[in-house]
Image: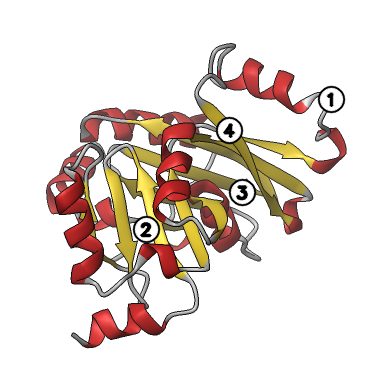
Amino acid sequence: MAENKSFEQAEVLQLQMSEAGIALIGAQQEIVGQFAWGTAAKIDSQFWEKHQIIPAHRSQIRVEIINPLFLLLPTEYDSALYRIGFLEKALGESSLLGHEIQEQSIHYLKSNLLFLVPSTWKDYLAIHFPLAQIEFRHVMAEHLEKSNTQKSQHLSIRLHQNLAYVALYKNYTLQVNNVFEYQSGIELAFYLHSIREAFDFPWDTQRIQITGPESTNEHLLTELQEYHISFAS
């Protein structure tokens, strides 16, 4: 009940949206409840009632988007005239169909992270939270912000569902900003080893950070160790 009370009093309601559905984020940035897309309206309504949230009364919402549809673009090249062309080239010509463009500034990189939000997700929010001001943030942008480090060489990996968001810094410069979809540990290991070899990155656990919901997946970590990839405990 105390958790529910905190949602009632919280000025900003924090949500997470992905292909899996909608998740409610608690004060400690943990997932406290979630439901899948296509859930019956009654169950949907019961979910908000359970957490003592009246959607129509919420005025501020922060939504973290979990998907691979993003592009980091230096600010000097980001303009309304060219950004659609950059996105279509990076993500595919039909990538914008059924999506809307959002942006998030990464100041220390002097860049904007452009990302796509499915129109159906925005429609859900518009219908259920009609009075809310909605701030969209992307998991990759958040990952880059947290990866900002003074280390000359640093590899930061966030694992969420079957997506690995990777940021590699070498000589204090961002070299890799990418997402990799994997179905097994061997696929993820191959991808990480390819980064290590391509950028001559020493696999020093003190220079590697792994976060995200799957970072404690013992089966996955054991599988990675079989391919000589381990992380500091």
Separation of residues labelled 1 and 2 (CA atoms):
36 Å
Separation of residues labelled 4 and 1 (CA atoms):
16 Å
Q: Is residue 125 left or right of residue 230?
A: right
Kindly report which numbered mark, 4 or 1, lies closer to the viewer in this rendering: 4
The residue furthest right is 76
Q: Secondary structure at mark 3?
A: strand
Q: Earlier in the sequence, mark 4 or mark 3?
A: 4
Residue 1's label in the rendered image is none
Separation of residues labelled 3 and 2 (CA atoms):
16 Å
Q: Which residue is mark 3?
A: 169
Q: Secondary structure at mark 4?
A: strand
Kind of residue indicated by mark 2:
Thr
Q: Residue at x 65, y 16 (%)?
A: 89
Kind of residue indicated by mark 3:
Tyr
Residue 172 visible? The answer is no
Separation of residues labelled 4 and 2 (CA atoms):
28 Å
Q: Secondary structure at mark 2?
A: strand
Quadrant of residue 94 within the rendered picture: top right
Q: Which residue is mark 4?
A: 100
The residue furthest top is 93
